[in-house]
Image (cartoon, helix red, strand yellow):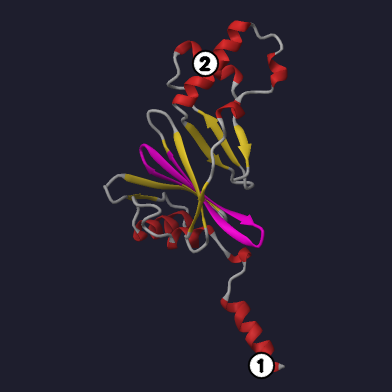
Amino acid sequence: MRKILLLSFLFLVAVPSVAQVRMKDVFAQLPDSVLTLMTRNNRLDCIDFIENNMNARVKNRFNDQVVLEALTEDYLYVRTSESSFVEMKLMPQGSDTLICVNRTYLGPVEDSDVRLYGLDWRFVRIVARPDVKEFLKSQDAFQSWTSEMADTMQMICSEADFLPLIKASLSQDDTTISWTLQTKEFNKETKKVADKYLQPVTRKP
C-alpha cells in the first residue's frame, strides 16, 4: 500500500496540473517556428524585463524592435514589429488546456490568423473566422431600409467576400475572440454604410 501511495504522489509531482501552467513558461518554451522573429534569448529577456517593471524591448532577428507589452498568468501581447503583433491566451478545453495564438498583420489593413496548439506546441487547428454576413447587425435595425440601402448592404457583403480582411482580438478576461471586419479599403460610399451597420463578432474558438 505504501508503495502505491508513493508512486501516486510521484506521479502527481511529475505531471503539472492545469492550474500550474503559466504563460511566461509557455512563451519561454515555444518553438522558433511559432514565432520566427524572436529568438529564445529575446523571449527570456522580455520576460525578465517585464517582471522587473522594466521596458521589455529587444531587437528581433532582423534588428527591429520587439516589445512585450502585456504578460499575465494566462495572456500575452507582444509587438513583434512595426507592422505586426502576436497575442497568446491559455484556454481550458475540458480537461485540457490549449494555447490560442493570434497573429495580426497591421498594414495597410489589419488581418489576423488565429490558431490553437497543445501545451506541447502540437498544432491543433486553425480557428475559423466568422462569415461576412455574421457582422451585420440585427435585422430589427433595418426596418426602414429602402431598396437602395438594401443594395448597398449587398455591395458590402460582395466587397467583403472579395477582400475578407478581418482583425481578431483575444480577451484578457475570458476565452472569447472578438472579430472585426475591416472596411478601410472599401470605397467611400460603401465604407460609410458599412461602418454604420456592421458590428464586431465575439465568440469562443
Query: Disc 1 marks which amino acid?
Result: Lys
Which corner quadrant of the image does residue 197 belong to? top right
Tell me the element at label 1: helix
Helix, strand or loop at mark 2: helix
- Residue 45 on the magenta span: no
Dot 2, how many residues are within 10 Å of its Cα: few (below 14), some (14-19), or many (20+)?
Answer: some
At horizontal 65% and vertical 83% (from top left) the residue drawn is 8
Q: Which residues are magenta?
A: 78-104
Q: Position of residue 180 (x, y in %)?
A: 54, 31
Q: Label 1: which residue?
A: 3
Residue lying furthest left:
62
- Rendered view: 72 above or below 203: below
Q: Nearer the viewer, residue 82 or 119?
A: 119
Closer to us: mark 2 or mark 1? 2
Q: Which label was assigned to residue 155? A: 2
Could you say which quadrant of the image residue 200 lies in? Answer: top right
Is 195 on the left or on the right of 44, as rendered?
A: right
- Gap between marks 2 and 1 measured at Cα: 71 Å
Task: Check the image and report above or below for 66 versus 27.
Answer: above
